[in-house]
Image (cartoon, rainbow, N blue to C red):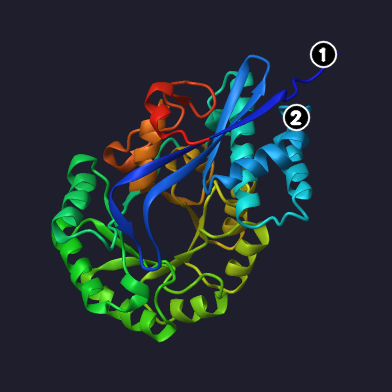
Amino acid sequence: MNRPPAVDRVETSVYTVPTDAPEADGTLAWDSTTLVLVSVGCGSVSGLGWTYAPAATAHVVSGVLADVVTGSPALDVPAANEAMRRAVRNAGLPRIAAQAISAVDIALWDCKARLLGLPLVHLLGAARNEVPVYGSGGFTTYDDDRLERQLRGWVEDDGIPRVKIKVAESWGRREERDRHRVARARAAIGDTTALYVDANGGYGTKQAVRMGRSLDHEGVTWFEEPVSSDHPSVLAAIRARVPQEVTAGEYGYTLPYFAHLLAAGAVDCLQADVTRCGGITVWLRAAALAEAHGIDISGHCAPHAHAHAAATVPNLRHLEWFHDHVRIERTLFDGVLSPDGGTLTPGADGAPGLGLTVDERRARPYRVA
């Protein structure tokens, strides 16, 4: 009997890409984004995975996780995921350790699919042919002209029928400008495009209720993290008092976190980030947990890391076509997907795994480790 293929190497690299303009949401500002890339090898085959996280994440991969994964059966990804989670017990699973596990897990799934010569969506089993996306950006640092250009690009050039902007500027201290920007967004996209907002936890409880009612006048249907998702009972109370769908979950690093949100009745649609929650292995479990509660799931950011797994989920709402991550993934990778008509079609070209390769020439100027 032939021995199953085993992982024989785990390598990391780190890339920092400046933004194309100053960016901020309700609670944070930034001028660059860092991607930690993991390559998992099995003989002549390599799989890619990544997370958007500090460069220190790469040290967790090389210093804690690589020895756990090396020598493990390349086809048994859930076993490797569990071994990694146990290995970071004392290091602390949430946040950086979970992001490190996520990047390795994605790379393991990509490697497995490449070993079998299948697009990852076909290895996992498709539930749909197309994956809807929504355009996401609309940073609070944008002036009106830049905001409108970005929104119109998604709607008119790409045919994306749903878009999202940031609100709760300066921790909710600029309500009038929030209202102004939402009104400008609605004017730019017309009446038939869905309009979403994301407060990144920047509003107070009663302020979020007040803003939710105000935003209804502009037809806003999605109110993301009106307050911090660390307080599910507060989210649930807001959900009961605003007309929009209340959504959260991007900061879920463990499966119980999602269970707590769902048990509290805190969300109308659960968000989960494959580059944070533990990779594809755990993201699919979060989707199943949401389905058991009669709730849809939406993939947060990193669209090319999500696309294949998202196509296997019957209760998928959509993926976030996030401006920063789209720029970075188009820069670093060949084989990226196009959101024509507002949907992605992962696996359509038959390329194995995620269908991506690193373009070393384009990536080199941004490599920092």
The answer to whether residue 140 is left or right of residue 65 is left
Seen at 73% across and 42% down, the residue is 64
Q: Which of the marked residues, 1 or 2, is nearer the chain's N terminus?
A: 1
Which residue in the protein does label 2 denote?
70
Compared to residue 238, the image places residue 77 above or below, namely above
Q: Quadrant of the N terminus?
A: top right
Quadrant for residue 30, please give it: bottom left
Q: Residue furthest right?
A: 1
The answer to whether residue 190 is left or right of residue 45 is left
Seen at 65% across and 58% down, the residue is 94
Q: Amino acid at mark 2?
A: Thr
Seen at 54% across and 44% down, the residue is 55
Q: Is residue 168 visible?
A: no
Which residue in the protein does label 1 denote?
2
Q: Residue furthest bottom?
A: 206
On the image, the x and y values in percent for residue 251 come to: 54, 60
Seen at 55% across and 47% down, the residue is 274
